[in-house]
Image: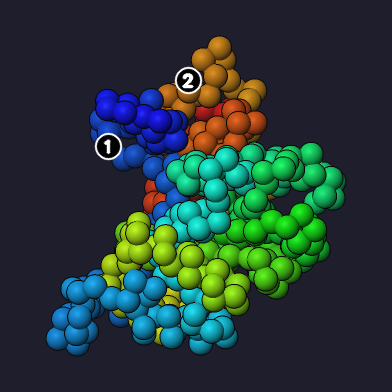
Amino acid sequence: MPRHPDVSAAAHGLPSGVFSRLAHRIAALEGEVAPLHVGDTWLEPAVGARMQDLDAASEPGLHRYTNPMGHPGLTAALARRRDIDPARILVSGGATGGLCAAAGALLDPGDEVLVLAPFWPLITGVVRAARGVPVEVPFYDRLGTVSERLTPYLGPKTAALYVNTPSNPGGQVLDAQTVQALGAFARAHDLWLWSDEVYEDYAYTAPHTPVAPAAPERTFTVRSFSKAYGMAGNRCGYVVGPSDPAVMQELRKIGVHTFYSSPTASQIAATRVLEVGDGWVQSARDLYRRSGDAAAARLGVDPPQGGTFLFLDVGEHLGDGGLHDFLSVCVDHNLVLAPGTACGAEYGSFVRVCFTSAPPDVVARGIERLARILGR
């Protein structure tokens, strides 16, 4: 029970950033930097759905609040595209805001969430901020049935299961059999199922299998205009929940009392991109796949199944200073990578490499520097 000048233990325990120990050095870099640490794209959004394409004359209310559940035009467009009732949709401040709404609505203090690892770096903080407890479950790189991999981590306070496909950082695309088994596991143990599918449009070697059909009564699927359409700065994503309107109402309460609503202009741009952006996605998918395949080939690893990352074990190159010193050497070469520890405690010898965060020629030069550091 904190009192001035103390803050809550939950807030104090959150990391301030993935790169807090190297941030000052990264900020001081000069010349061409290969920023392969951030999950973003060098591409601008589709023409017709950029901010400069909007104006208040043609979009009345552009600078006003919209419905906190989502701009009516956007929720209607999403409902048509997904063939669902608009009441199942909450438009959020990015997919991150959607997951925060789910965590706030579905967790009591001390409730546990099984987080399949390696995982998106922010998900454990999302759970902790809601006073929940993330339980890291090494999964994507482990053998065995779903039940064999997950059961040892179950406890009396387990409330939810977090799944990410295609995976950030590993790029794995879960097959239909695994997805069905995850749904069955959640149902057997009375768990909510949070499915992070922000990279659904970027599956390369196998089709993306949505999770919700495996357990529709308990699944919340989060999606993102940031990853799908290159609109990360707009902060617009959405959650599709079960058909029970009472459950979605609880998420909406959390949304109202945190981000209130995603920016109106961002939602109008998102509505437009649903109309004009399919060709952009197809082109981006081809560009991303070529960049990822080229990076993987140069580094001597398997090409990504999906997503925008490679996840590399650099353990044989770590000295007494561990991963921090390795990342520091990379910074010396104007190369910035994300530490594997941000994706799970068991990944202290890994680095995450984003192959879409800069133009392909910049990425290629950064990958070349990394290959030389690794002696490849």
Residue 224 left/right relative to 106: left
Q: CA distance from mark 2 to mark 1?
A: 22 Å
Going from N to C along the chain, the mark reached first, 2 or 1, is 1
User: SS class of the residue under badge 2?
Assistant: helix
Q: Residues within 10 Å of mark 2 (few under 14, many from 20)?
A: few
Q: Which residue type carries mark 1?
A: Gly
The residue drawn where x is 32% and y is 64% is: 260
Question: Looking at the image, is mark 2 or mark 1 nearer the viewer?
Answer: 2
Q: If the image is split into quadrants, where does the C terminus sit? A: top right
Whether residue 218 is visible, yes or no, is yes
The residue drawn where x is 69% and y is 56% is: 191
Q: How far across and down, in percent of the image, does residue 6 sit?
A: 32, 26
Q: How far across and down, in percent of the image, does residue 331 sit?
A: 39, 29
| Residue 215 sits in quarter | bottom right
User: SS class of the residue under badge 1?
Assistant: loop
Mark count: 2
Q: Residues within 10 Å of mark 1 (few under 14, many from 20)?
A: few
* Residue lying farthest to the top in this orientation: 320
Q: Are dots 2 and 1 in contact, CB under 8 Å?
A: no
The residue drawn where x is 69% and y is 41% is: 137
Residue 155 left/right relative to 297: right
Q: How far across and down, in percent of the image, does residue 139 sit?
A: 72, 44
Mark 1 sits on what residue? 31
Residue 79 or residue 186, whichever sits in front:
186
Compared with 331, 149 (above or below) is below
Compared with 240, 16 (above or below) is above
Q: If the image is split into quadrants, where does the N terminus sit? A: top left
Q: Which residue type carries mark 2?
A: Asp
Whether residue 312 is visible, yes or no, is no
Compared with 373, 269 (above or below) is below
Mark 2 sits on what residue? 325
